[in-house]
Amino acid sequence: MALTGRQKLWWVLITVLVLVYALFPVLSILATSFKLPGDLSSGRFLPTTWTWENYAQILAPDGSARDLFLPALRNSIGISLIATLIAVVLATVAAYAIARLDFPGKRLVLTTALGVSIFPVISIVTPLFNIWRSIGLYDTWAGLIIPYLSLTLPISMWTLAAFFRQIPWELEQAAQVDGATPMQAFRKAIVPLAAPGVFTTALIAFFIAWNDFVYGISLTSTSAARPVPAALAFFTGESYFEDPTGAISAAAVVVTVPVIVLVLLFQRQIVAGLTQGAVKG
Amino acid sequence: MSHSASGPAPATDVNKPDRRGRSARPRASDRARSEARLGILLAAPAFIVMLAVTLYPIVQAFIDSLSRIRLTAPDANEFVGFGNYAVVLSDPVFWSAMWVTLFIMVVTVAVELVIGFALALVMHRAIKSLRGILRTAILVPYGIITVVSAFAWFYAFDISSGYVNSWFDWVPGVSEDLNWFASQGTSLFVIMASEIWKTTPFISLLLLAGLAQVPGELEEAAKVDGATSWQVFKRVIVPNMKAAIMVAVLFRALDAFRIFDNVFVMTNGANGTTVLSLLAYRTSIGRLEIGLGSAVSVLLFLSVVLICFVAIKLFKVDLSSARGGN
């Protein structure tokens, strides 16, 4: 369908509008991250003079907030990756069974995943806080990885179960008829079809773990395990006499860049994963 | 249906007709049994882990909520039955948090449904060359950390670091010295703006998936019959994707009911912005009143269950058909 000039103009306008909606707050904090402390109260969107000082504060060897930010970044990456990995491995195995095998309780597993995904995180933080303190998991990586599974595992189960249902499993048998061993058949016929789904699921699960705040502030107390979102909220306390706005903005930009890169690279897969796991007739 | 085309026993209801059919063929029954065993074996780890990380703590929370437990006085634990619940439920602070939470939930979900629908329609109708850009843009808020979004909105509105006041000083009520975070209404406005911005993409993607299920011929037919765009939307599109809308609303409502990050960052509950999650957090982690905090946590959990129950029974939201099917 060819578009008339006016329709084209409309579409350009709409696209610009959507871009402004989606990107404005990001640009806003990006602009703030380049402002000097004296410039913050200018009442203007853009900095009057651009400065890297805030980034130096959180990244440079002599930066004042470096010891707050870098350990938190390490914790966030490590904890989120491990929680994602464990969830995806467990969910892949379970979703394979759900898509492929006939067994009683299949429905129960999926319903449980649904129930867990709507579970209010704050409701289980209190008992965990208490238990973790008595068994020594408080303020450790493991102490966050375990509860993170309540975030990453259910979504992985749903997304993978939906993906795996669409795989034409008869290809495996076809390959065996053609003389492949069962292992070869699985590796050559099924793995290439399943891998994109597993990867997309891992991305979505990672986003969710990366976003966590409640567990992060409740179950940690030092830089030993405190992830970035929690650390950002506590920047204020540590450098009380310094205005932390610039440093927080710079740190916020640093943790947002990977998200934007992943979204740019895998937009199609993420949309497919989100909509498949969620609404599928 | 989870239908495995190549499976030795076609996946159907295990219960009635199949079993009889299988017992006539003992070899198939053996196979079915070993298949069932393998299935349970593979699904069990994920199932057990899910229960271990949620069911066990919530049961523990319930047990804790029946005692007076203060970490500030660890030896003074005492069983008080439902005493903690009586304390919480008779405290105006709890009810204020409940109403604020419900208010945020209703307003954000309503606004998100409108913006989400608009975005979904835009993505659905967009010409191919624009689709990629639009979807990528939409995913940015989805991927961003909620705390980062909270700071972005906070700094934009904040009286000392913001620019919103000087940009919008022509709007009645907005002036250079308006402190958005000094009163309940204006604080909630910014909190909800951040929440809406961050979570609308999710709702719009769910709606986009729903739109894809609306038969195109119906829209065409309605247009041929002279229906306006609004009539087509109201009479053809919406009724045909009711299930998707309901699911999107329920999921977002439950999510909004648990709001925490935005409030914590922007006001930390000041000026009547305390929400239920924040109340639970402050009672347990802040004041170390584990008994009372657990009671708030259990009440929060029950509220979520209640919302779910009402949605499923009253509004007939069919989660199983809309989420992955069975």
Image: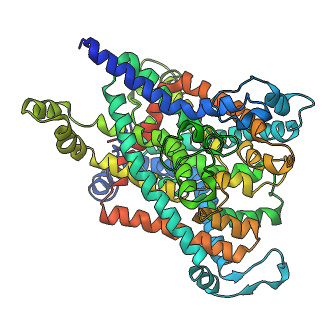
Residue A233 visible in the picture: yes
Instruction: Give the left or right position of residue B209, taking residue B259 as reference.
Output: left
Instruction: Give the left or right position of residue B59, taking residue A1 as reference.
Output: right
Instruction: Give the left or right position of residue B57, taking residue A191 as reference.
Output: right
Instruction: Give the left or right position of residue A224, taking residue A26 as reference.
Output: right
Q: Residue at x 30, y 61 (%)?
A: B315
Q: Farthest right residue?
A: A62
Q: Quadrant of residue B162?
A: top right
Q: Residue B249, relative to residue A127: is it above or below?
A: above
Q: Residue B155, relative to residue A143: is it above or below?
A: above
Q: Position of residue B72 (x, y in %)?
A: 83, 75
Q: Position of residue B171 (x, y in %)?
A: 48, 43
Q: Nearer the viewer, residue A198 or A261?
A: A261
Query: By what rule are the colours in the image chosen?
Result: rainbow
Residue A162 visible in the picture: no
Q: Residue at x 79, y 35 (%)?
A: A37
Q: Position of residue B23 (x, y in %)?
A: 32, 55
Please give the count of numbered marks on the rendered protein.
0
Q: Residue at x 53, y 39 (%)?
A: B168
Q: Residue at x 58, y 65 (%)?
A: B276
Q: Quadrant of residue B278?
A: bottom right
Q: Position of residue A158 (x, y in %)?
A: 47, 44
